[in-house]
Every structure is written in C-alpha cells, then in structure tokens.
Amino acid sequence: MSTGEGNEGSASLAGAQEVSEELLKASKTLAEALDKDSGRRKAIPIRKSFVRAEQGADSPPPLAELVRRGGRGGGVIVKLYLALVWRCSGGDFDTDISARVWASLLGLEDPNFKGARRIAKAIKTLEDCKLISVVPRRGEPSVITLLDESGDNSPYALPSTAYASTKLRRDIYFKVPTTLWTEGFIQRMSASALTMLLILLAERSGDARPGETNGKEVWWSTERFPQQYFVSPSMRSRGTKDLRELNLLYVERASVAPPGNKRTFARERVRNVYRLQNQALVFVDEKSQNSAEVRKGATKKRTPTLVQTLNAWMEEEKEVQSSS
C-alpha cells in the first residue's frame, strides 16, 4: 500500500544541506583516503547503546543527547563522532588529526577558522558526554581517544571483538556504510536525517544481500519509538522526509499485525514501514568479511594513505595561496 507520497529522490536532492562543490570535493577526497586507510573494513561499527535506550531508561541515549545539546549544530557533533570511530576503531583507538582537517572532512564552510571552531566545540561536547577523552598538547593537535559508545566513561574496545569473547548485550552493534561518506551523503545530511539513518541501521533496516537494492522492513508503534530513542515526532518526520529525498529510504503504508499474534483474524493496524536502500545498505558479504578479520585477530597498523593525502592536500593549498 502506498503512502501517497513520492519516494524517489529529486535531481536537486532537496533533502540535502547545502555544501559547495569545492568543499564537497575536498571532503570526498579525505573520505576516500580514510576509507583506504581502514583496510578491508568498509563499514563503521557502532554499538546500539549509542542509539537506543534500555527499556525503562529515564535518560536519553548518547545520540539523542548529542542532538539535544547541539541544537541546529547537532548534526556536526554526530558526524564528527562517526568520523572519529571510523578513524580510530581500526587501530589504537586514538588520533591527533587537527580540527581543520575534521572540518574539511565534514564539508564545513571556512574549515581553517569558522569550521575548525565548530569542530572544537563539538569535541568539547563529545568529551562532556564521555564518548571521548582529550589530552591537549601545546602547539599541536590534541590527542583524542575513543571511549565506549554508551557514554559510561569505560574504555573503548572494538565491539565485534568484545562481543565474540563475552557475548554481552552491551556489545551488540551495527554498521554504517563508508560509501555514505565517500559519495558525499553524510556530509549533506541534516541532524534529523542522520539521526533517523542511525536508528534505522541499528534496527537492521539496511541489511541486504549482494544485488539487492532495498533493505529489511522496519516499523514501530507510536509508543515504543520515543521510549527507545527519545526522538520527537517532528524530528522523526523531518528525518524520514530528508532520507527519502536523498533516495536512501523507502516508506510505505502497510497492515502490520501485533507482534507474536498468530490468530488468523487478529486485528491489523496500518503503519509506516521503512526500508533503507541504495548507498545505505549493509551487504551480507561485507559483514562476513569483517567477521573473518576479527577471527584472525586483525588490528593492523594504519597504512600511511591518509597522512600522504593530507600532506599532498596541504602542499596543494600552499601553492594555490602563493599563486593568488
């Protein structure tokens, strides 16, 4: 059953935030270098505790708290956190990349000054929420170290490795496809769109087999959604709309029987059913590949790809400035 609303993304990507071609090109170059630096891992692992609160919890999960604290800039904080996990989770769980570079990766305006200040503010918020620890260094970028996604101030461990050894619920995780970065989608997402994307990925709506263009169906009751995610109806609506216009989400109205009800004539309810699609999909072969790496105990040192790209990029900037 159709919603009566279009699901196709428009040519102008109406759901996207405005990012200039120049900024987006620089951002995608850095994202591609970071992707190569991450080796075979083509998805960012995030514990579900970052997105979803435990049943009966009084306080919001870290995602909702970051968006609340950041206001209109909440999207920058969440994007930076995803980028930090992407950079750090494949190595020693820390990094000393400068705020200016993070600003460029996120596609922020004026990355050297205004963008860098926004990053510095976002880092402070992440530190206050106990998602990272920060060690300042005089005359050099601070060293940022990941902490557990739950925000309980515990040390970070790769969730796949932790879950394989302990099978604890707290280490259940989902994956964010890196193609969303390398193809410029996350850079242009609103805070609402990114929030809904992470929620849908946490609910495994992005799971698909190679060759498929749509993920699994997900739906919620109106009572369950705010209790688990602490997200307002307006943010849910705006985020869903933006993802659809980016052609990353398909929504339809469908009859859904209550969970566990097998009666033939059980009362059905009509709800929105969500399915991620296209670049938002996490394919089965990617998940198997990452599992194989964990079994081998592979946490290799990072390759110099990102460092080389940053150096070349800075040299290019110097040449442009000297010739102007």
Image (tube, rainbow, N blue to C red):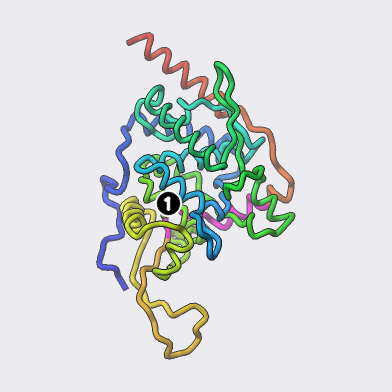
Which residue has dot 1 on it?
Answer: 195
Residue at the front extreme, as displayed: 58
Residues drawn in magenta: 276-291
Q: Residue 168: x, y in percent?
A: 68, 58
Q: Report the residue at 63% width, 56% height from top.
A: 170
Q: Report the residue at 41% width, 55% height from top.
A: 196
Residue 184 appears in view:
no
Which of the 4 image quarters holds residue 268?
Answer: bottom left
Instruction: Please tell me whether residue 315 is drawn above or below residue 174 in the rendered image.
Output: above
Q: Secondary structure at mark 1?
A: helix
Q: Residues within 10 Å of mark 1 (few under 14, many from 20)?
A: many
Q: Is residue 166 magenta?
A: no
Instruction: Please tell me whether residue 89 is drawn above or below residue 306 in the rendered image.
Output: below
Q: Residue 30: x, y in percent?
A: 48, 31
Secondary structure mostly taken by the magenta-highlighted segment of the chain: helix
Residue at the top extreme, as displayed: 322
Instruction: Please tell me whether residue 321 is drawn above or below residue 188 in the rendered image.
Output: above
Instruction: Please tell me whether residue 223 is drawn above or below residue 208 in the rendered image.
Output: below
